[in-house]
């Protein structure tokens, strides 16, 4: 989501006559986009700002600004206490950046952290710099109304609002015309997308028609309101990817209740079963928070057993990090000691790796349609791409290039990566996947 926001800011700056440079030392303006989701995300930003202060010593005219989620949370500390920055802009105030920069050049500090009920930046065409030209993100909503007790997002990014369907479809058409082959639609909970009665399943269906050779993914879905209609659309439309990110957060009902996640372990498991039934071969990933307030050893074991039961293809696993203003901060005690959180996190990582390895090994011998994204980081002779099911595949370069859909037969697998041999260039509509057992 921060990538998508930075692309909007690029567009606003370039309209303002600013030009990008390749390194911070040659910049007149440095804007840092920030994340507040966990403490270590914020710690990285403070370090980065200290580095920029050292550059400022060489270039007194340099303007340093902070954008995004941390802006509202710590604006005083940025401006007054630490004197690290000249400009602070919240996630709904990016349009004001040119006028705020003008204030800074007249010698003032400039701040706008007002959150909006309407802003979706629908009319701003993001400027995508430094990407691979093959895959892109498109924001379809902003903010969140869910108020999970651990989460700072509703406070930093404001109320939930959906972008107009027409502007989303126009952006997809533009990306397709520019040669992009895969787009990920983004929102904190895409299932609550609602543009004057157009719901997410309908939006996905419409998105699939923009270009049958452009893949569509989405993130994130909340388990509380996943419609069957969307599962059927994914199964029917070849270019809607068979991959769903569906954060569980915990496998224990008491913890889920304290987290204010309005579903039970049983409901979550039956939702996943339904997904696997309606979309044969679908892959699933999740987010888990370990060591949440009051989490007992037994409750932790319920999360381990959930992961063992599901065997997610992928997972993003976090130790709980207390955030000011959240319900958990006000009502509960962050009482799981750091070393216990770390030990539980490691246990979850281990069980995740074991499950993903089994899932990935079941791909050996199968053919997949891989969209090549770029050169492999490890070797110029290899390319890296992804299956429709969002698994990373490394293959020999041969004559393939980024942007090609390649039919690949998988011959090896680790818990994180598949390795395969590219057979030929193919296409979404032409490729016939192997039958998979449910
Ligand atoms: N809207 C998405 C999640 C966005 S935040 C959803 O509801 O699924 C991404 C992930 O960060 C969350 O799913 C959660 O697992 C993690 N996260 C959020 N707040 C956290 C906190 N205070 N400590 C640790 N992890 C957190
Ligand atoms: Fe945070 Fe919950 Fe909203 Fe996700 S759904 S952004 S975890 S409040």
Image (cartoon, rainbow, N blue to C red):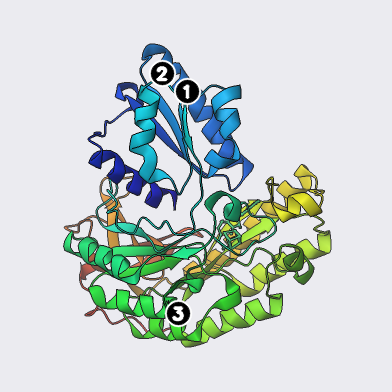
Ligand 1 quadrant assignment = bottom right
Q: Residue at (44%, 59%) from the top-left corner?
A: 118
- The answer to whether any part of residue 437 appears in the image is no
Residue 134 found in image quarter: bottom left
Quick check: 21 left or right of 50? left
> What secondary structure is marked by label 3?
loop
Work out whether 87 lies above or below 115: above
Whether 96 is drawn above or below 333: the answer is: above
Measure how far apart labels 2 and 3 are at the Cα level.
Answer: 51 Å
Residue 381 marker: none
Query: Are dots 2 and 1 in contact, CB under 8 Å?
Result: yes
- Which of the two discs, 3 and 1, labels the residue nearer the N terminus? 1
Q: Give the residue drawn at x 44%, y 53%.
A: 1
Assess mark 2: CB under 8 A from ligand 1?
no
Residue 51 — which label? Answer: 1
Question: Residue 281 — which label?
Answer: 3
Q: Residue at x 16, y 58 (%)?
A: 399
- The residue wearing badge 2 is 55
């Amino acid at each position: 989501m921060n990538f998508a926001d930075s692309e909007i800011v690029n567009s606003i700056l370039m309209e303002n006559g600013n030009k990008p440079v390749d390194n911070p030392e040659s910049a007149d303006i440095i804007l840092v986009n920030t994340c507040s989701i966990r403490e270590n995300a914020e710690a990285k930003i403070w370090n980065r700002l200290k580095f920029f202060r050292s550059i400022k010593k060489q270039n007194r005219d340099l303007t340093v600004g902070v954008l995004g989620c941390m802006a509202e949370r710590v604006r005083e500390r940025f401006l007054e206490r630490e004197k690290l920055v000249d400009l602070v802009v919240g996630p709904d105030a990016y349009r004001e950046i040119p006028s705020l920069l003008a204030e800074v050049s007249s010698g003032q500090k400039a701040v706008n952290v007002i959150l909006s009920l309407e802003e979706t930046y629908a009319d701003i065409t993001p400027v995508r710099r430094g990407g691979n030209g093959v895959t892109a993100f498109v924001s379809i909503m902003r903010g969140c109304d869910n108020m999970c007790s651990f989460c700072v997002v509703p406070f930093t990014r404001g109320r939930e609002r959906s972008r107009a369907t027409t502007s989303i479809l126009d952006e997809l058409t533009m990306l397709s015309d520019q040669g992009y082959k895969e787009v990920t639609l983004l929102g904190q909970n895409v299932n609550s997308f609602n543009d004057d009665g157009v719901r997410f399943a309908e939006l996905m269906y419409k998105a699939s028609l923009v270009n049958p050779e452009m893949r569509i993914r989405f993130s994130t879905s909340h388990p509380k309101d996943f419609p069957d209609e969307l599962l059927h659309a994914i199964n029917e439309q070849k270019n809607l990817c068979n991959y769903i990110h569906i954060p569980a957060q915990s496998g224990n009902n008491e913890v889920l209740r304290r987290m204010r996640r309005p579903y039970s372990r049983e409901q979550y498991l039956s939702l996943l079963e339904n997904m696997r039934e309606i979309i044969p071969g679908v892959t699933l990933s999740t987010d888990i928070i370990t060591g949440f307030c009051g989490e007992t050893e037994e409750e932790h074991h319920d999360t381990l057993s959930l992961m063992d039961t599901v065997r997610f293809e992928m997972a993003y696993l976090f130790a709980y990090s207390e955030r000011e203003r959240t319900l958990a901060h006000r009502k509960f005690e962050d009482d799981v000691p750091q070393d216990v959180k770390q030990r539980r996190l490691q246990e979850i990582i281990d069980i995740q790796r074991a499950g993903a390895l089994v899932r990935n090994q079941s791909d050996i011998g199968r053919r997949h349609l891989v969209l090549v994204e770029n050169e492999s980081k490890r070797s110029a002779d290899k390319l890296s791409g992804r299956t429709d099911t969002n698994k990373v595949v490394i293959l020999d370069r041969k004559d393939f290039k980024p942007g090609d859909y390649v039919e690949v037969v998988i011959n090896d697998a680790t818990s994180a990566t598949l390795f395969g041999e590219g057979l030929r260039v193919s296409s979404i509509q032409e490729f016939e996947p192997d039958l998979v057992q449910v």
